[in-house]
Amino acid sequence: MPEFDGHIPATGGTGGGGVRLRILHVIFRKELVESLRDRRTLFMMVGLPILLYPLLIFGMSRLQESQQEAQQQRESVVAVWGGAPDSLSGRLGGAPRLKVEAWAGAPANVRRSFEAGSVEAPVFEAPRREADDKNPKPKPLPGAAWAKAAQQLILDRKVDAVLILWPDFAGEVAGGGVGRATILYDSVRPDSTTARGRVSDELRLWRIELTEERARERGLPAGFQQGVEYATQNVAPEKRQSGMFLGMMLPYMVILLSVLSGFYASIDLTAGEKERGTMQTLLCAPVEALEIVGGKFLAVWAITLLGTTVNLVSLSLVFSRVKLIPGMEMQMSVTTILLAFLLLLPISMMVTALFLAVGAFARDFKDGQNYLTPIMMGLVFPLVATMQPGIELNAHLAFVPVVNIALLIKSVFLGEWAADMVFLVMTSSLCYAAMALVFAAQVFERNNVLLGGKETLGGVLDFSRTPGARPTPGVSLLLFSVVLVIAFYGSLSLSKMSLPAMLLIVQYGFFLAPALALVYAKGYDWRETLALRRLPWRGLLGAVLIGLSAWAVASGILIRLLPPPESLVKALEKILMLDDRTVPIWQVWLLMAVTPALCEETLFRGLIMSGLRRLGMWPALLISGLLFGLAHASIYRLLPTFFLGVVLGYAVWKTGSLWAGVIGHALNNGLMALLSRSRETVEQLGLSGQKYLPWEYVAIAAVVLAAGLWLVRSPANQRSSTTAEIVPGA
Amino acid sequence: MTDNSATLRAEGLTKRFGAVLAVDQATIHVNPGEVVGLLGPNGAGKTTMLRMIAGILTPDSGRVTITGLDMAERPLEAKRAIGFHSGDTQLYRRLNAREALIYFGRLYGMTEERLRARVDELVEMLEMGAFCDRPCDTYSAGQKQRANIARAFLHDPDLLILDEPTTALDVISGQFIVEAIRAEKAAGRAVLFSTHIMGEAEYLCDRIALLHQGRIVDQGRLDELLERSGCRNLTDTFLQLAGRGVAA
């Protein structure tokens, strides 16, 4: 669990803010047991999903069905104003569930003007497009007496629709012309739209009969008037059709109901404990604040995940028994459910942490409900947006919290997910979850908040400057998350710039500047935090060997494990060549090798690794390496960049000098740029046409790498007392 | 008055909440087998002071050591030597007293064997057998208080800190707590407790510290306080020191 530095922990701190797993487990178990004995939590976690899905799905479809049935059964009453030819009167009169009443409700003056032929038909525009026919654009109702009378008749529900046959309708039809008619209806009243449909269908059929008869009379071939016949065929596979339906409503419901499982538990374990005074009892026990928040977080998260599981299981059971689209069974495969569960992990993590952090500010249980409700509302709005059919996951939305997960779940149900998109969404969601966790940890470090005292948000986040302080794991995690989000959106907004300009801004503006600004703002010791020490000659030599060989080991072994798609390789080569072969190689090196080496090393092996130091060497190397890998924003690049991050981290840790990382990184990138650019070099090495680096090269590189690692770990490198201090057991 | 073997040494404690100075340069020592009372009206700063001593709140300045352990430097070890109880504290509603005691015993690092034995011992000693396996939210006020006292005594702490332990209790339950404090004193434990009930303080305390508006205005044995103030009883002494002097 991370700790945010910058103040003396209110519990006094153990100097390390460490977490004892045994205590974490004791707190977790107690909180879980107590929460599971709470009926409200049980209901939210198990009862609601079990009850709600069947009720919602069956209930809604039943309701819809019965309403439709009732509508279909009910007879439509239609007033016909105007003279109809016999054939039309006969057809309308004989149509099922259609009751035609001639001149019903027509005021005497209106009827007279129709019969006298003095009514003027409005400008007539027959619907030309299907959409216009189904959903006609609203046209203003004419101010004439007939229009007002018909409107009132329909609104008073005396009839469902009024069919107006304009003057000389019968004459036009009989003479081979076009008879004009208008159906007046109320789009808001289902009975009225049904009536419109029924009348419209009868008119359509009557028109076909009429045109066929006219053709026959004139000896024209069948279809002369129709001219063309066409049909439509839906090609969407059944899975996709059900996915569309599931994808639209499922992310919304599952996300909401899952996080709701932890709602009461969060309040009970924070505001509830405050209200009962047990929080104070816990705070005076010999436990760290991080152990308390960690145990509580894990308990609520476990409850949320149990709720998530119940939700997914209940949902899939209900869907397997219901036909939402006629003729189609809904199916949710195990893979789909597992993937949905996986995607719900970071979002539930984030919301749980937020619930706990915000709940801790509340004075009592009721207050807690008031505090947490806005968070729930904050979830509902983006989720409702994702229910719109047109919205799909794209690069811009991949970093928008909540929305990204909901849209990805949607594409999972459509069977359209891509590994790289899952990776990007998971990375960004984990970043947000990390931010929420650090915030929660920070709140729980403030005993004053936990005891019911007042504290401002600024006070909790504590941006104060403490000269000589050192960064903590929480700072590292927070910095990484913020930098990644800024860099992601930053590069998207810079996408119209030239590649070199974009690279420079991302590296110096989004990586280096935030790191340096944070060191300055928090008053960290520059030399200690960024490992700014002279690199001894053995370390230098080791870094050079690592820089020359790491890429070959990584690409020789790791790329074979997860080969990147051709498009990614091409895109990377394009970047390495700066989009242009004519740029001199020294410029490429400056941009592609030296710049990332300086900026990324300062951020990852400097500040981030420095914050992770107190966790010990291997956790620090692995976590900083993982963050370095995640920052490369592609699942295919994760393994090689993670490997490079760990190796460079090792060099910096052992030599105590950031320069070991800078030199290794610069050589690594420089070599790759050279190989991408220079065909001759590739050919000289006998690598042209090879998909992977041949094993003999990998073996040589591995030996060189081992030699480099041996050189950097040499005790001669560990010169300063500080270095010895940061190398446990060295 | 004090020596280096004091169980509690709190020196120059100061705490400010925004513009409010809650505790100002308060110093207090408690020796083994000694009961020290912290007396003051509501809002005097008693709870804040006890919370700082218990390591729940960090003082803005000043230092707390428990059995020689510095609270700022070794908080976990120092806290292990303290049993803290506040009169308004409740219990985990959906756990029973036995489960709650086991939970805290584990947090205090007690071995399972010792913990079980100690819980049985406390259940018998505090006559909790009839209710200790029922959920805590079914307890009467007196039963809750017993369970809370059991939790504070559970790990055999060197120092007991009791914040208005008899608040909201009837006479019998209050008397039970008072007797428990006497028993702990007899067992050689140091006890620091706050109260605004003067009679309790007179009956129990070896020494008394009078807290007013965050400052300790006087402290000493009861007879010393009475002599210095010239008053007949503690209530008058307190009122006089608090600046609302009454005729002696």
Image (cartoon, rainbow, N blue to C red):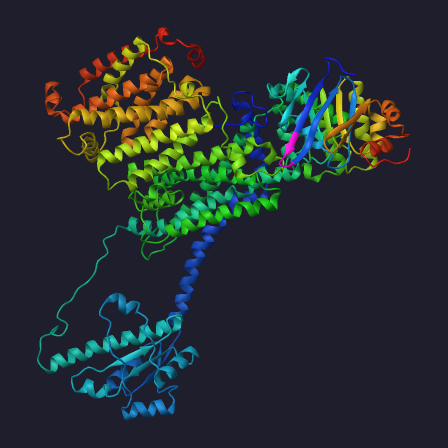
Q: Is residue A662 above or below residue A43?
A: above
Q: Can residue A647 be seen at all in this image of the molecule?
A: no
- Quarter of the image where the C terminus of chain A is located: top left
Is B44 on the left or on the right of A339, as rendered? Answer: right
Q: Is-magenta flag for residue A286? A: no
Q: Can residue A311 be seen at all in this image of the molecule?
A: yes
Q: Nearer the viewer, residue A114 or B128?
A: A114
- Residue A35, picture quadrant: top right
- The structure residue drawn at horizontal position 20% and vertical position 36%, both measured from the top left corner, is A567
Q: Return the x and y of residue A85 as percentages of the image width and height.
A: 24, 86
Q: Nearer the viewer, residue B232 or A337?
A: B232
- The structure residue drawn at horizontal position 20% and vertical position 34%, both measured from the top left corner, is A571
Q: Nearer the viewer, residue A651 or A272?
A: A651
Q: Return the x and y of residue A194 as percentages of the image width and height.
A: 35, 72
Q: Return the x and y of residue A479 as percentages of the image width and height.
A: 41, 31
Q: How many marks?
A: 0
The secondary structure that dominates the magenta segment is strand
For the view shown, which residue lies furthest in the top direction? A716
- What stretch of residues is rendered in magenta? B15-19
Q: Return the x and y of residue A662 as percentages of the image width and height.
A: 30, 20
